Image: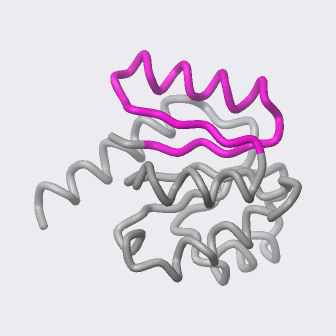
Amino acid sequence: MRILVADDNRDAADSLAILLRIAGHEVEVAYDGAEAVHVAAWFNPRLALLDIGMPELDGHDVARALRTRTTHRTLYLVAITGWGQPKDRQLAEAAGFDEHFVKPIEPFRIEELIERIARSDTSS
């Protein structure tokens, strides 16, 4: 699967990207929100894992920007954040995220998500 990982914490972004590449996925990394929008434009990911608290554009702004582009209508967006209160989840949903994961994330949860997306792609 083509996956965009966006997080201003370079270690977190790079570690997640390595795990996803080892699992066989094609991954691009962005270290801020503006870069995430730029990378998504040419990479055309199926899944984007976006940190909420990024500089330039935060994850909510990135989600809104990606949702407005017709090429990204099938993009599955996941908020990855340290914020997990009901209000935080509502803000993520309003910005266009499909899911909201609170850090730290167990890698098996991401693989389960990828498998679910892949199953839905083959059934549609």
Residue 74 lies in the magenta stretch: no
Say above or below: 118 vs 1.
Answer: below
- Drawn side of residue 70 relative to residue 81, left or right: left
Q: Which quadrant of the figure has residue 100?
A: bottom right
Relative to 9, residue 19 above or below? above
Q: Residue at x 49, y 39 (%)?
A: 110
Q: Specify whether residue 22 is painted magenta.
A: yes
Q: Where is residue 19 in the image (x, y as percent from the top left)?
A: 52, 20
Q: Position of residue 112 (x, y in %)?
A: 40, 40
Residue shown at 35% from the left, 68% from the top: 74
Question: Residue 51 vs residue 24: left or right?
Answer: right
On screen, 49 above or below 77? above
Report the front residue among 15 and 93: 15
> Left or right of 103: which side holds 21?
left
Specify start and end residues of the magenta stretch as a single range.
3-31
Q: Position of residue 79 (x, y in %)?
A: 65, 58
Which quadrant of the figure contains the N terminus? top left
Residue at figure coordinates x 60%, y 56% from the top left: 38
In the picture provided, is 84 more to the left or to the right than 25?
A: right
**Looking at the image, which residue sits at the far left?**
123
Where is residue 22 shown, x and y percent of the image?
Answer: 43, 16
Instruction: Determine the residue located farthest toward the top in the rendered image.
Output: 22
